[in-house]
Amino acid sequence: MAELLRTVSNHVMAYPYKLWGYGEGIALEALISAGDYLREPRYWEFVGDLMDRWISAQSAIPYTDHVAPGKALLMLYQRSAQPKYLTRAVALAEFFVALPKTRQGARLHRPDHPDLANYVYVDCMDFDAPFLSLLGQVTGRRAYTDLAVDCLLGHARVLWDAEHSLFYHLYDAGRDQVNGAFWGRGNGWALLGIIGVLESAPPHHPRYNEIVGLFQRQIAAIATLQTENGDWHTVLNRPDTYLEGSLPAMFYCALMRGMQMGIISRAYLAPAQRAWQALLARLNSDGVLQGVSFATPPGTAEQYAAIPTGANCPWGQGPLLEALLIGEP
């Protein structure tokens, strides 16, 4: 297992990171955790070098860095105790505080961009709230925990479909409408964001049980949509769309972490086992997860089905690495 973890970690480090895009966060968090498991500081140092360049490049956080990996910043701070990482994390939190909101309370991440100013993305559920919740835990400041809950539930109000217990990819506040398709990886972002908040928020928080209920309803829907071989379709309720490679990794992590926390029953072990087998079946001899769709803009089911798949995407290798660190169910 150690050698496989090193191989996958090396692929994570080989990706040409930009500052910052969707997918970087989960890969860098997993890389730090791999450094813990393997006791190899070079993985933390790789993440630290990326963060140091970002911190040095500009003092203020621009809108283009609206999905900067804040949780990775805090993980570095917890391991190094270097104040610069906490200082940057607090600055990122203040950036979120200042973002405009829809009338339902969802943050609008790109108010500077004329084409994106009214958009709420499901991807952000795994970037904003888990970071803010961990910041509340690290600093002991309840205000950050409250902000985490506010961010998470604000997104849920506009993206959640109660009938299907799934999340849409996009909400357009200008038109007051969603994009109308249940993108698989988007639901992975949502599940991981929800469980990430629950892992660091205090259970006595007044809205904690509401978030638990949201996770339970979504995970139940996800389990019913799993195929017999453990995969999921890229549009979850559309069997005519292809089986997508990042989904068994993401959903396996959510299932296992939910069971470890005791917020879902051990009855979910069977879908977790199927997801694990699907994950291993997609792992090639070079340690690369196969069938992961490339960067995916919001669209229709047909548009999602037309997105090509490739290899060594951080939103595939990151969840893969996290799944391997959890281990076999």
Image: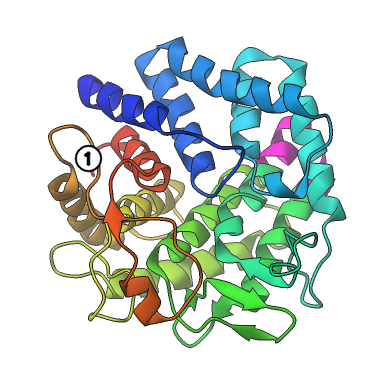
Measured along the vertical axis of the image, is residue 136 above or below residue 112? above
Q: Main secondary structure of the magenta part?
A: helix
In the image, residue 188 lies in the stretch drawn in magenta: no
Image-quadrant location for residue 91: top right
Q: Residue at x 58, y 51 (%)?
A: 198
**Residue drawn 48% across and 88% down?**
163
Give the quarter of the image for residue 296. Answer: bottom left
Left or right of residue 192: residue 272: left
Quadrant the N terminus occupies = top left
Furthest toward the right, the residue is 98
The residue at 25%/44% (across/down) is: 289
Residue 136 in the magenta stretch? The answer is yes
Relative to the observer, which residue lies in front, 308 or 87?
Answer: 308
Residue 41: percent from left, percent from top: 46, 11
Color scheme of the displayed model:
rainbow
- Range of the magenta residues? 134-144
Taking the view exactly as shown, the residue that stands out farthest to the front is 114
Please determine whether, in this image, residue 108 is positioned above or below residue 72: below
Q: Which residue is mark 1?
A: 328
Between 170 and 17, the residue placed more toward the observer is 17
- Tell me the residue at 70%/86% (across/down): 176
Q: Amino acid at mark 1?
A: Glu
Q: Is residue 322 visible?
A: yes
Graded by Cα atoms within 10 Å as few (under 14), some (14 to 19) or many (20 or more), the crowding at tag 1 reads few
Q: Secondary structure at mark 1?
A: loop
For this view, does 251 lie left or right of residue 96? Answer: left
What is the x, y in percent for residue 215?
Answer: 50, 64
Query: Which quarter of the picture shows residue 134?
Result: top right
Residue 248 on image: x %, y %: 28, 55
Using the rendered image of the protein, determine whether residue 142 is visible from the camera's viewpoint. Answer: no
Looking at the image, is 264 positioned above or below residue 78? below
Where the C terminus falls, by quadrant?
Answer: top left
